[in-house]
Amino acid sequence: MTGPADFDARSIPELARAVRGAEESARSLAERALKRLAAADADLNIFLARDPERALAAADAADRAGAEAGPLAGIPVALKDNLATADLPTTCGSRILEGFVPPYEATVVRRLRAAGAVIVGKTNMDEFAMGSSNENSAYGPARNPHDATRVPGGSSGGSAAAVAAGVVPAALGSDTGGSVRQPGSLSGVVGVKPTYGRVSRYGLVAFASSLDQIGPLAANVADAAAVLQAIAGLDPLDATSADEPVPDLVGAARAGAERGLEGVVIGVPAECFGEGLEAGVRERCEAALAALAADGAELRDVSLPHTPLAVPTYYLIAPAEASSNLARYDGVRYGPRWDAEAGLVGMYEETRARGFGAEVKRRIMLGTYVLSAGYYDRYYGRAQQMRERIAADFRAVFADGVHAIFTPTSPSTAFALGERTDDPYQMYLADVFTVTANLAGIPGASVPVGLADGLPVGGQILADHFDEATVFRVAAALERALGEAA
Ligand code: GLN
C-alpha cells in the first residue's frame, strides 16, 4: 500500500454535496465505513469502541435532512478516545477510565454532529495521550496499516490508522507535542494541529492544558480543511478558545491546489536538517522543498536557535501540567475503584497504582518533582523561560517576512513495535520537530511527502498564530506538486 487506502475517490466536500443532493446515500457511506472498520480493526486494533447502530441512525438522519444537512453531511468520522462522548465510553486508553461514559459531550463532537458527520467509533491511543507509538495503550497497541509489524505513531495512532486503512476519510486526534502530526507522518495521512485557542478543548480530557489542541487527521489536505472548518471557532465553554474569525480554510486549500506559491516565502531552519535525521526522511523532505520551489515559493534559510532545548523544555512543562490534571483520577469520581476496603488513602493508592500504566506514572512523578517547593524555579521556572525563547525564535522568523516554515515531521519513519519501548529517552527525542509548535502555540500540519523503503514520510508546514490559511495553502500546493511529480 502506498498512500492512504482511499475511503472514496471523492473529497469530503464532494461526498457531502452528493449526500445533500441525494445522489449518494449517507447510509451507504456508513455501511462502507462499518464494513471496513470490522475488517481493518480485527488485524490492527484501531478502535476502542464501535458504534454501528447509532452510526446508521445518524446516517439515516443525514439522508432525511437532504439539502438541509450540513457541510459534513453523511461523512463517517472516528474520534480519539480522549474526546468526551455522552453515548460511548471515553477511556483515554487507560484502565483507570475503563467503562467510563462522560455525562456530557465535547464541543468538537457536538459540532461534528451538527455538521452532519456520522461517528463510527472511538480510536486507540497512548494512555492519556502520553506517547509517540500507541504502545502505551492499556488495550494493546494499534498497528500501522502500511506494515502491521510497525507502530502507527502516537498518541493519536488509532485515528491515523483508521484514515490510513480507509475506514473513514477523516478522524479527530489531539496534539500536545505532536500527537496528530507525528502519527499522520508515520501512517501516511495529513494531520493538522491548529493554533492554540482555535478549537475548543471543552470535553477533551486534559493532558497538558497549555499545549493541548484538537485537530483533524484526513486522507488529503482539502478533507482536513473541511473538518477543521466545522470544529473551529470561539466556544464560551472553553475560556482559552479564541475570539478570532475562522478564515475560509477550504478555500485556502483550494487556492493552494489550483495556483502556485508565487510570493510565498518558506523558511528552512538549519536546526531541523542536521544530524539524527534518517537518510530516507532527509531525501524525501529535500525533494519536497524542491517541489515547493518549483511551484514558485521562495525558500529562505532561517534559524530557530533554541530548537535543541525544545525536548527538555516540553518534558518538564507537559509532565508538570499532567501531574496536576491527573490528580482527579482517584477511584471516587470516575471509572473503576480498587480496594475500597483499604481506607480512603489506601483506596487512592491502590486505584492509582493499578489504574495507571508505567509511562503515566513516570510523568506524574516527574511532574510532581519539578513542581515541588525548592525545585520549582530550577526546573519548571526555567522551562517557562525556555518556552518563551522558543516562541521568540518563531516570532523573529515570521516578523522577517517568512510566511511558512518547512521541516521534517519526525526524524524517522514508522519503527517496529517494541523497538523503542525500553528507552523512553529515545522515544522523547523523536518529538524534536513537533513540540516547538505546541510550546509557541502556532499551527502546523504534516503532509505525506513520499515513501522511504516503502514507509511514509511526512513534511511539516508551520505558520504564524491563527494563520491556518497559509498552512493549508502551502500544504495543498505541496500535495498537488508531489502528486504531479509521481
Ligand atoms: N509524544 C509526545 C508525548 O509523549 C506528544 C504527545 C501528544 O502530543 N499528546 O508527550
Image (cartoon, rainbow, N blue to C red):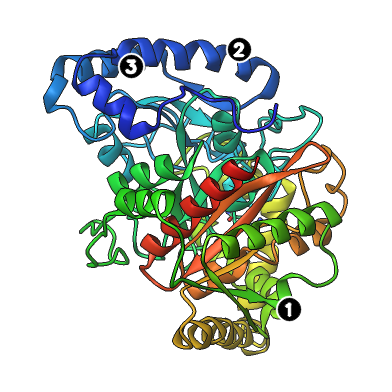
Quarter occupied by the C terminus: top right
Looking at the rendered structure, the secondary structure element under dot 1 is: helix
Q: Which mark is residue 54?
A: 3
Answer with the quadrant where ligand 1 appears in the image: bottom right
Q: Secondary structure at mark 3?
A: helix
Quarter of the rendering containing residue 273: bottom right
Secondary structure beneath label 2: helix
Is residue 8 shown left or right of residue 93?
Answer: left
136 w.r.t. 251: above or below:
above
Of labels 2 and 3, earlier in sequence is 2
Q: CA distance from mark 1 to mark 2?
A: 43 Å
Q: Tell which tag, 1 or 3, sits nearer the viewer.
A: 1
Q: Residue 280, how many percent across, how many down? A: 82, 52
72 lies above or below 385:
above
In the rendered image, which residue does mark 2 sit on? 39
Q: Which image quarter is the N terminus in?
A: top right
Distance CA(mark 1)–CA(mark 3):
47 Å
Pointer 1: what residue?
308
In the image, which disc is placed on residue 219?
none
Q: Position of residue 108 (x, y in %)?
A: 32, 44
Query: Which sits in the foreground, 3 or 446?
Result: 3
Q: Closer to the camera, 200 or 30?
A: 30
Left or right? Give the position of 262 relative to 358: left
Type of residue at label 3?
Arg
Which amino acid type is shown beneath numbered disc 1?
Answer: Pro
Establish if 146 lies above or below 405: above
